Amino acid sequence: MYAQMVTPETNGDESSPELAQFQARIDAGDTIEARDWMPEGYRKTLIRQISQHAHSEIVGQLPEANWITRAPTLRRKAILLAKVQDEAGHGLYLYGAAETLGVSREQLVNDLLTGKAKYSSIFNYPTLNWADIGVIGWLVDGAAIMNQIPLCRCSYGPYARAMIRICKEESFHQRQGFEIMTVMARGTPAQRNMAQDALNRWWWPSLMMFGPPDSQSPHTAESARWKIKLLTNDQLRQRFIDQTAPQADYLGLSIPDPDLKRNEETEHYEFGEIDWSEFYNVIRGNGPCNTQRLRTRRQAHTDGAWVREAAIAYAQKRAKNSK
Amino acid sequence: MTDWPLWEIFIRSQNGLSHKHVGSLHAADAKMAIENARDVYARRNEGISIWVVRSTDLYASDPSDKETFFDPAKNKIYRHPTFYTVPPEVKHL
């Protein structure tokens, strides 16, 4: 759901023997590797999905970086720095996985900076108080884990391996967030209010991370057949809510959904209507921080240009001198 | 401006196993590749030694030749100890 609305490419060469063999390999649980034959649709869909995921990791650093200089203690600052550094690492694993499919890093970065490629809608919301850092770890990273664990079994080897590394590291992200929430929920009334306020603002956007309802996602079937999407948006969202609601109870915070209640028969939580017009609006570029996020990324890329050029010049000079 | 060259990263973990491929990254030269590999692939004590190889210097077997290339090993089951029957009363064999 770091890749929210990936429209799969369809195959022009539907009936070729290679395609039948490829699908048979996937059905048998084989892993597809970079140099194996694959249909163009599979390749293009994966590039789109993996790069969207990578861009989300990179842009996802920004809302949290906002609080590094203002973390309440040295312990929290060290943890937040480590977490934001992890997000950069996750972006790099995923760019690496996308590049095995034949696209260049330069192209991927350009697509982000020109706004051609998307990243997750969640990172277009602002982090207004310290409790937002707690909620991001608890809910946003919790939702990310929910989505990424099944992807560890996806059909494309380099993507699956990147997911395994990321999931191992992501668990710390969720726990440090929940720890922040625990401390604030048990703190002074003012801290409690901050925690509740952050939960109120992030709850619905977190549910939107899983993407539109299945009834509005007509392309899921193709990605499911290729095993690059293993559970549907609604299945993942339901699991997330079932897992998270009791955690909110533990914190003594209330989820801002009057319709949320556990159905004892199905053993699942029922929940209220999600405002999908908000989601589509953010995806279209009109969220609270879309402009700011892209501007910050572009600025960082421009400011770093001389470093990239100088490093190449230095490497070339050293290579020449050592001959 | 074109990308920095791509490097393949191999890390040996603490447990004495051989270096294992962990992924790739871009860097201007080998020294930078090793430093970046530490930050990207070994933030949690994953290794005690790093190798980096320019991706263009890596040669691989052809996946479409997989069958003709590897199949000759398949029917030589006598290369495995389980091929042989050991009498139950014989020890240390």
Image (spheres, coloured by chain):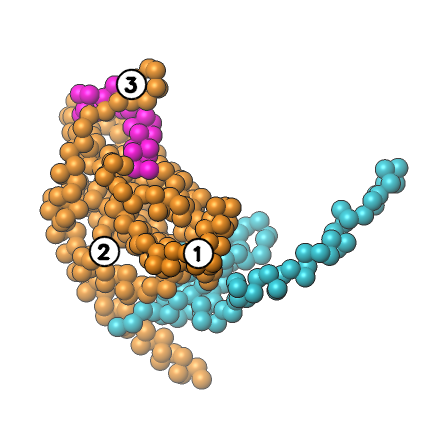
- Mark 2 packing: few (<14 Cα in 10 Å), some, or many (20+)? some
Which residue is denoted by mark 2 in the rendering?
Answer: A117
Coordinates of residue B51 in the picture (x, y in percent): 49, 63
Which residue is denoted by mark 1 in the rendering?
Answer: A19
Is A201 left, or right, of B64 in this rendering? left
* Amino acid type, label 1: Leu
Which residue is denoted by mark 3 in the rendering?
Answer: A262
Query: Can residue A174 be seen at all in this image of the molecule?
Result: no
Q: How far apart are the alpha carbons under marks 3 and 2?
A: 38 Å
Q: Nearer the viewer, mark 3 or mark 1?
A: 1
Tell me, what hue is chain B? cyan
**Colour orange maps to chain:** A
Q: How far apart are the alpha carbons under marks 3 and 1?
A: 45 Å
- Identified at 27% across, 37% down, the residue is A214
Coordinates of residue A124 in the picture (x, y in percent): 17, 45
Q: Residues in magenta? A: A232-261
* Amino acid type, label 2: Ala
